[in-house]
Amino acid sequence: MKKTLFVGIVCLLLAGLISSCATMDTIFEDKEPANAAGLDDKDEPSDAQDDAKSDESDKIVSRRSIESLELVNHGKQLLEEDNNAAAIVDFTNAISIDKGLADAYYYRGLAYDNEGDFERAVQDFSKTAAINPEYSKAYFGRGEVNLKLGEISAAIYDFGLACDKGYIAACSEREKLTGSLAGPRLNDEKVLP
């Protein structure tokens, strides 16, 4: 049992550093894996090898980041040309590369809004805000779409969030809807967001 536990721990610790460890059958049969026998310090990768792997990984991530940002920039150009369908494709491709790219969701939300696909626009603005809660334009965009959908309370709420984050146009929109820069009030004079 001690040998099985030891082999399991060694495999977990060295995962990715050696091409293969013991198979599950070998571990559970309590057999010595062929490549675990005689493992010593000289068999472990050097710091230089670790650094090389890390550098290569960083280059791949960097190339992917650059590619996704290029797609977002190209999509923004397409948006300016009112080519919303092509812009949506670029933003979607950028998202497939980097699911955490808030700008791609935001601008795709704008393109969906321009196309009249308000439900998808709301989803993308919401995703933008989920990725980056300080992205005030996402709340403003969602507020505008909610207004188009007739969701006045949701629009007021979103404009309030954007206003609280310093987006002045959102403060103005909330004031238009509520008659107050501070937002709507309840009977007890508490201000709603």
Image: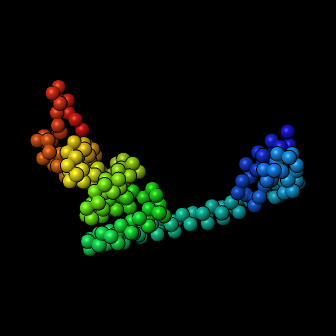
Q: Residue at x 86, y 46 (%)?
A: 29
User: In which quadrant will I find the N terminus?
Assistant: top right
Q: Going by the picture, which residue comes out furthest to the top?
A: 188
Q: Is residue 131 above or below residue 90?
A: above
157 or 57: nearer the viewer = 157
Q: How many marks?
A: 0
Asked whether residue 163 is in view, the answer is no
Q: Residue at x 31, y 54 (%)?
A: 119
User: In which quadrant will I find the C terminus?
Assistant: top left
Measured from the top left, where is residue 33 in percent x and y? 85, 53
Measured from the top left, where is residue 32 in percent x and y? 88, 50
Q: Is residue 124 above or below residue 97?
A: above
Q: Residue at x 24, y 54 (%)?
A: 145
Measured from the top left, where is residue 15 in percent x and y? 72, 53
Asked whether residue 34 is in view, the answer is yes
User: Is 84 left or right of 54, judged from the image as shown?
Assistant: left
Q: Residue at x 80, y 41 (%)?
A: 5
Q: Going by the picture, which residue comes out furthest to the left?
A: 179
Using the rendered view, name the quadrant where residue 43 is placed: bottom right
User: Is 172 left or right of 28, judged from the image as shown?
Assistant: left
Q: Is residue 41 above or below residue 89?
A: above
Picture colour scheme? rainbow
User: Is 63 left or right of 19, judged from the image as shown?
Assistant: left
Using the rendered view, name the quadrant where residue 110 is placed: bottom left
Q: Is residue 52 above or below residue 153?
A: below
